[in-house]
Image: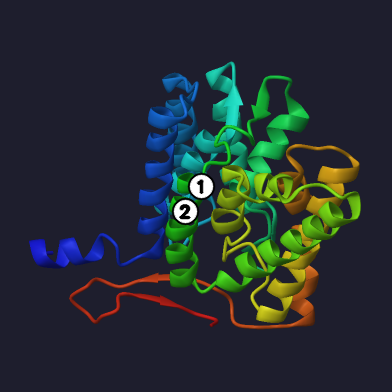
Amino acid sequence: MNEKAFASTLFADPRDFQILFLLSFLTLGIWARDFTLRWDCVAAAILSSLLVQMIADRIWYSEHPSFRSALITAVSLCLLLRANSWMTMALAGSISILSKFVLRYRGKHFFNPSNFGIIAVLLLTADGWVTPGQWGEEVWFAMFFVGAGFLVVKKVGRWDTTAVFLLAYAFLEAARNYWLGWTWDVYAHRLTSGSLLLFSFFMITDPRAIPDHIRGRILFAALVAGLTFVLRNYFFLPTAVFWALFVLSPITVLLDRLWASKRFQWIFQPASIAAPAARIIGR
């Protein structure tokens, strides 16, 4: 592959943009938000994810081995999950990747890998925790997340999921805010959370784990928004979005049976063949 073709393939796959933005968020968080990251934990998450991906691809004879997806999972864990031990992060990375190969129905996994890994660590160990407030509610953070996130979901064709989730959740929070007679500062404070925006653009939109048909995705996003609202306001769970997605992910199987559609797949072609190089099946 010549230099021109190599350069053109770097961002032909939408996952390249996702990796770039997630790494940018991580760097920004360390620089501007003083993330208390431990580099042994970062290394453990990345190495365990890539190693388990390589082993699982061989065991299950994967036709399209993907280190891109494994790296996205690892960086997502570094952004959202904290632990005192590198072994906990290695466990999170390993379980996340294994969930893609073990928890499948008709060849499709139905849990977002990083979401599954986070919940598994919270349930199985006393060493991990999620820091939903680490990004604060600064406007310029929110604008960066929305701009980068919109570019990614537009490329993978899953902007509908983000839009429905945010609109449904914003409506429920507005109704509650009005009912309680609170000022709208409280409302803005809740909706500009960096963790909420990261979840909306980079986790609930995983095209390989959510319903294939647009009707299924709309219903799924609305249900996740509703359960998030209930868990956050009536059970006072600060990590409500992650629990809501985890609990509702299995209904993807039912929604795919109710509204069948072509399966989403990542297809990558060398730039020398034709442009654009990335195509999405099922849109």
Q: Is residue 209 left or right of residue 238?
A: left
Read off the residue under disc 1.
Answer: 139
Binning the other alpha carbons within 10 Å of mark 1 as few (below 14), some (14 to 19) or many (20 upward) gives few
x 69%, y 46%: residue = 185
From the viewer's perspective, is residue 59 above or below residue 207? Answer: above
x 79%, y 55%: residue = 173
Residue 155 in view (yes/no): yes
x 49%, y 40%: residue = 74
Considering depth in this image, is 165 or 263 the residue closer to the camera?
165
Considering depth in this image, is 175 or 19 the residue closer to the camera?
175
Q: Position of residue 241 (x, y in %)?
A: 72, 48
From the viewer's perspective, is residue 87 above or below residue 121? Answer: above
Residue furthest out toward the top: 84
Query: Which amino acid does the dot numbered 2 rest on?
Result: Met
From the viewer's perspective, is residue 59 above or below residue 6? Answer: above
Q: Is residue 173 left or right of residue 150?
A: right
Query: Circles 2 and 1: CB distance less than 8 Å?
Result: yes
Query: Which amino acid does the dot numbered 1 rest on?
Result: Val
Q: Position of residue 216 (x, y in %)?
A: 73, 75
Considering depth in this image, is 180 or 28 the residue closer to the camera?
180
Read off the residue under disc 2.
Answer: 143
From the viewer's perspective, is residue 55 above or below residue 176? Answer: above
Binning the other alpha carbons within 10 Å of mark 2 as few (below 14), some (14 to 19) or many (20 upward) gives some
